[in-house]
Amino acid sequence: MSTALADHVATQLESLDACIQMVRDLAGGSLAASGSHGRVLRDVERILQSLRVSGAVVGGLAVIHHGYHRFTRDVDIVLPAEAVREFLRLAPLCGFRVARRDRYGWHALVHKETGMDLHLVPEHAKPRRGAPTRIPGPHDLGVSGIGLGFPTLERLVELKLASGRLRDQADVVELLKEHWGERTGIRKHLSKVHPELAKQFDLLVTQAQREREQEKNR
């Protein structure tokens, strides 16, 4: 391995470690502004507290929260639909630049201090064309009170399956391997949301089972 590549890998690992610690702090109720992700969430939290609304941290950070530790380069937040306009108004005053305004609500911002992307995920929107479900709001995802929180495992899997992306399906497989004993409860939830999601989930359960057996035999 070249020195440059080794340095890059070391930097990525340090960033992941900081990200994991930040996720643990947030889940424990204290948001330490450590690492780039932590500084982004610190400033998002300031806006949410000003607006007196909640926000759900989804995407890669939510995957880390639920036990699959992988690197993520950005921050994804579900906001209440009625709070988006005011969030965008306050964002430039709290360390963000609005990079893209989207007619469907998929707004993109850049955190000026860190250069990290912040993606707003619109409540009630469909995650893709033809998706069987719409994106729940923070409270329906499992966030209580004001400020940032994480979705429940069942809701996170729901979001991942509804997106239809291969990388999200891969996340579900890894989450299943971490929470194998909870697969029945997750499926029960998905079957209530939409039968198509339960069908997709069954296929990923099979894949996760296959990988679990392969890993045992290594």
Image: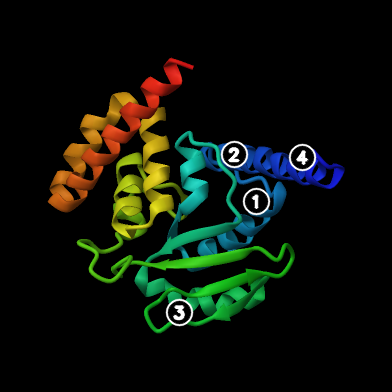
Q: Residue at x 65, y 76 (%)?
A: 93
Q: Residues within 10 Å of mark 4 (few under 14, many from 20)?
A: few
Pointer 1 residue: 38
User: Can residue 23 be seen here?
Assistant: yes
Q: Which residue is mark 3?
A: 85
Extreme-top residue of the structure: 217
* Residues at marks 1 and 2, CA–CA distance in whole angstroms: 10 Å
The first of marks 4 and 2 along the sequence is: 4
From mark 1 to mark 3, how far is it between C-alphas?
24 Å
Sequence-wise, which precedes: disc 4 or disc 1? 4
- State the residue in front, 206 or 188: 206
Instruction: Give the mark nearer the N terminus: 4 vs 3.
Output: 4
Q: Position of residue 37 (x, y in %)?
A: 64, 53
Which residue was labeled with disc 4?
10
Q: Amino acid at mark 2?
A: Asp
Which is more foreground, mark 4 or mark 1? 4
Residue receiving disc 2: 25
Q: Quadrant of residue 100?
A: bottom right
Q: Earlier in the sequence, mark 1 or mark 2?
A: 2
Mark 4 near mark 1, Cβ–Cβ under 8 Å?
A: no
**Disc number at residue 91?**
none
Under circle 1, the secondary element is helix
**CB atoms of marks 3 and 2 within 8 Å:** no
Mark 3: few, some, or many residues within 10 Å (few <14, many ≥20)? few
Using the rendered image of the protein, determine whether residue 194 is visible from the camera's viewpoint: no
What's the residue type where badge 3 is placed? Arg
Of labels 4 and 3, the one closer to you = 4
Marks 1/3 in contact by CB < 8 Å: the verdict is: no
Quadrant position of the N terminus in the picture: top right
Query: Could you tell me how far apart the alpha carbons at marks 4 and 1 are, in whole angstroms?
Result: 19 Å
